Amino acid sequence: MANLTLELENERKKIETVAKSYGLDFFETIFEIVSYDQISQFASYGGFPVRYPHWKFGMEYEQLSKSYEYGLSKIYEMVINTDPCYAYLMDGNSFMDQKLVMSHVYGHCDFFKNNIWFSKTNRKMMDQMANHATRIRRYIDRYGYDVVERFIDTCLSLENLIDRHSILNGPPQFKEKKPELRESDFVFNVTKSYMNRYINPPSVVEQQKQQQMEKMKGMTQFPSEPVRDILNFLVHYAPLEEWQQDVLNIVKEEAYYFAPQGMTKTMNEGWASYWHSTLMTRHILDDSELFEFADKHSGTMVMQVGSYNPYKVGIELMRDIEDRWNKGKFGREWEECDDVRERKNWNKKLNLGQEKIFEVRKIYNDVTFIDEFLTEDFCVRNKLFVYRMNNDTGKFEVDTRNFKAIKSQLLFQLANFGQPIIKIEDANFENRGELLLHHVHEGLDLQPNYMDETMKNLFVLWKKPINLITVMEKVPQLFRYDGQQFTKHNLGADTPEQTSLPIDND
Amino acid sequence: MSIREDQSRFKNIVKGKVREDFKRFVTNGEMIGRQENELIKIPIPRIDIPTFRFGSKQKQQGVGQGEGEEGQAAQGQGGSGQGQAGADPGEHMLEVELTLDELAEILGEKLELPNIQPRGTQNLVTEKTRYSGIAPVGPEGLRKFKQTYKKALARYISSGSYNPEDPVIIPIRNDYQYRTIKKTQKPFTRAVVIYMMDVSGSMGDEQKEIVRLESFWINTWLKKHYKGLETRFIIHDAAAKEVDESTFFKTSESGGTLISSAYKLCQQIIETEYPVNEWNIYPFHFSDGDNWSGEDTRLCVQLIKEFFLPRVNVFSYGQVESKYGSGQFLKDLQKDFSGDERITLSQIESRDKILDSIKDFLGKGK
């Protein structure tokens, strides 16, 4: 498959060897040279050559190819998390570009293979995606394009309702059953009916029944505890036709496949950038290419004033960690040291830097990465700030340079991808089989029109009224969509819901 | 490639959506406001798959990097508002950018300027210049290498000095060829559209907005489809005056209403500048129909009957629903001209009816 020119192949071998000598560990990586049109196509398919038919890919393609044609943006590099790893190089890029991209790609490949959040991803996703495509095409043939497309739209609307923390265990399998009274538990089979009242004495049966009813009172909650993984829950419990269940499952699988990439964007790009920089400047770069490299590298790293660049933050944090562990700037002694000069000249010559960053790339994700390694020094050095829209001037303003504010803002953005946290609270709400969702309000309201549409889509799957508890304009409210219209109830102090369904409001 | 299928599917949906919800866009006043460099950004509803997400107004904070004191403006826009950090592939908000032309095309597929005729004297032509000619002189930037090389090669071969073993061709001054402009001439049909708008006090802001939007779209569409179309703009209350395009779409005045004033000015313009045998003439008049007096209305009817109808291709009158109820003028015209194909009357009850009204005017294609 690989179609590298001899020249590039030689460089690739060289880069691979050097990368391995640093301890990078990756699946076999296959590079392909493709045209911009192909790379736009692959990129719109999320890196894969084949996906199921859907207009959203066409939409991506339209944007990517247009923005390339108008010279707005250009995809330099693309690599997918599979075994073997496939990476695409764009033809027409300069020789230096290709070397840079290859070095960068080996960084990603190592990350894919070793970061724990990727450990449960399907490395044969290339085949899996193709299988998904085949299945969906088959459904299209059977049920019609419009029907299937509409259903996919519905599923995609719920795509973000997954539990990203279940990634490490693989998606949970639901075994819960809706609680119901089963006589078979205490009424024995009787072959001779005249024996019945001796084997199942009415008083005992009645007593057992009472006991079970008593027990069930505590169990009527279904699911027994709130479920974050709504997509998976629906796959298991929504009253769907077989093909619909399969489509929903496909959407779920793909969402879970891509989730770790979102969870580790800053780290992953930081790691890859760290390595392209290291490999290129120390080994691969030809003297004559230095300026071009510097230009391209700084182009990737540029922090436009007032914006956040995962490449930049990632690589700087990686380097900061390396430096701190090389010099021993960690641990209690370091934390407790207040002397500025001493801190500045702190160097215990531990040289644990490399070891540490390899460990970091293995067990952290963006949230834990920022939480643990973002330091006040780092924020000051890199001039980070929190900006805020000033509604009077209509402009973004530097809000604060306070370390804690920066950190919490970053963490808030990264945690759950900046998506609202929504749980299934009750799938048998009001004992009518209605769905009750709870938006854990963290200070931001949901976008009302999107909320309505998404609830409609949920209704399509669940086929019974959808209820959502959220906070809208500081008022806790219960929204309900019954298939025809929306209603809302203020969850004021006098309503009983208040006690049984507490609202997080921090 | 299946991506092409997806792409065309997407385009069809977008176009379909634009058509389906088109009224929404047309009546969206922001649309005019948002054009920059002739490029309009249209957020396409529902193509952005709805999900539970945070409201956009609250998103406007994030982490940035750079200089600046607290409270100072952070230049550029924040790139890491919620939802952007680590977004899944394919989750971004879509804005389809259409140029005014493209939009006009979508709008105008079924529309045409009614009853247009080839008019104009024989010698009236448009001249188009294109860089399709070849000349022996010109600026170096326009030198055509291929032609120059060919000519030099021909010279070498014909003079017998060409050596296939050592095929070095050195062009001399005579071989040089340059691109040059070439003029092509095309006869064309000339048309003028005269927009008249009532800006009197009885027209509320909403009414004016509707009229502006409607004439804006008519104008955009006509400009796209008829090259060399001339447009004139008249606003009137009790008195009429001619204004330029941007003033036309911005002015708000108030005063009484004498529709005849606009018609007289229009008459004057046509008489002095647009001889009937050379021009297709399309007056459009928008008003709330609340004319000052019945007498003035009679004068208008007379003007239309005696001056306009014999001369213009189609006379179009659009009446917006006034806040004081619908004006009388439309009914007066209906009474006098019902069934006359040279006059088109349209009532615009609300923003939603703008597209229908445009179709009234341009959908006939007589």
Image (spheres, helix red, strand yellow):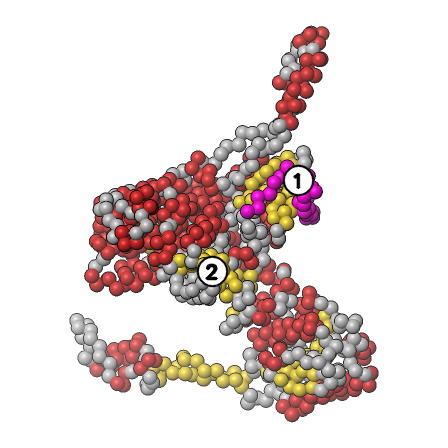
Which amino acid is tagged 2? Asp
Q: Distance between the residues labelled 1 and 2?
A: 38 Å
Indicate whether A100 appears above or below A500.
below
Q: What mark, if any, has residue A399 been given in the picture? A: 2
> Which residue shows up at 34% across the image and 82% down it?
B178
Which amino acid is tagged 1? Glu
Residue A286: x and y, percent?
A: 21, 59
- Left/right of residue A189 with respect to residue B149 in the rendered view: right
Disc 2 secondary structure class: strand
Which of these two is toward me, A448 or B145? A448
Name the image quarter holding the C terminus of chain B: bottom right
Q: What mark, if any, has residue A178 been given in the picture? A: none
Crowding around mark 2 (Cα neighbors within 10 Å: few <14, some 14 to 19, many 20+) is many
> Which residue shows up at 59% across the image and 74% down it?
B220
Residue A430 occupies quadrant: top right
Does the magenta segment cover residue A483?
A: yes
Indicate whether B80 appears above or below A239.
below
Q: Earlier in the sequence, mark 1 or mark 2?
A: 2
Does the magenta segment cover residue B209?
A: no
